[in-house]
Amino acid sequence: EVQLVESGGGLVQPGGSLRLSCTASGFTFSNFEMNWVRQSPGQGLEWISNITVSGSSTLYAASVKGRFTISRDNAKNSLFLQMNDLRAEDTALYYCASGRHCINGKCNKAAYFQKWGPGTLVIVSS
Amino acid sequence: DIQMTQSPSTLSASVGDRVTITCRASQNIRNWLAWYQQKPGKAPEVLIYEASSLESGVPSRFSGTGYGTEFTLTISSLDPDDCATYYCQQYDDYPWTFGQGTKVEIK
């Protein structure tokens, strides 16, 4: 069974840091680009970061660029999001989600989010 | 950034009704569009990708059409299980962006 499970959320003060993790199982993690998508309470969905299969290239939404860092460990089937300088507006449910499928350095165009975890809640508040 | 605009924001329909949700992109995204269903307290699930391809395991009452800037998601016969919020998402260009969502309720 394909599974993504996030962890590491919690309550943090403004200006603080938090590291989210996502553990994958049931599929070949190292063949998929991975993403973080967040959803503020009662609001819509916002893509925030992407990482290539090797981890050599990353992308960020403007709202988190310079504060958040995405990384992965293919040997441990894990995805991470280091979040620094957290703000109240970062309060959200954070999902990890799969992206493009890549084989031998070639990726398909299917950059939609096929697999999702249940999410981990981050609350930024004093 | 590419803006995705969905309409309506909320719709109420009866079981068995045909339901259509529209998504407009602020620029040409070809067919790089996905539709997701999100039920309360759950993660989104993909229904449609590449504008019209049905994801494996998704009931055939869901269908998608469109190209360029205008897209539709249709539920051919509304089922009580379809109560959810539906989102479109473009993946033609970074940053990938979502529509604001359409909440579907049963009358």
Image (tube, helix red, strand yellow):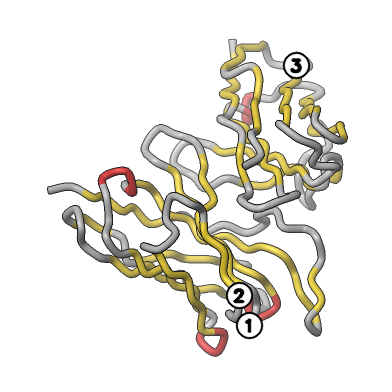
Left or right placement of residue A9 versus residue A44 in this view: left
Type of residue at label 2?
Answer: Ser
Q: Tell which residue pokes out farthest to the bottom in this image.
A: A75
User: Can residue B23 be spotted in the picture?
Assistant: yes
| Residue density around tag 1, few if under 14, some if 14–19, many if 20 or more, within 10 Å | some
Type of residue at label 1?
Answer: Ser
Q: What secondary structure is found at the residue carrying circle 2?
A: loop
- Image x and y of residue B55, in percent: 78, 49
User: Can residue A1 be spotted in the picture?
Assistant: no
Residue named by callout 2: A57
Residue at image x 18%, y 47%? A125
Label 1 in the same subunit as label 2: yes
Asked if the residues shown at circle 1 and circle 3 are in contact, with their CB atoms under 8 angstroms apart, the answer is no
Above or below — where is A114 with respect to B6?
below
Residue A109 falls in image quadrant: bottom right
Left or right placement of residue A39 versus residue B7 in this view: left
A108 or B40, which lies in front? A108
Asked if the residues shown at circle 1 and circle 2 are in contact, with their CB atoms under 8 angstroms apart, the answer is yes
A9 or A68, which lies in front? A68
- Image x and y of residue A107, in percent: 79, 71
What chain does badge 1 belong to? A
Q: CA distance from mark 3 to mark 2?
A: 47 Å
Residue A17 falls in image quadrant: bottom left
Above or below — where is B33 with respect to B70?
below
Type of residue at label 3?
Answer: Gly
**Labels 1, 3: front one:** 1
| Res. A54 mark | 1
Residue named by callout 3: B16
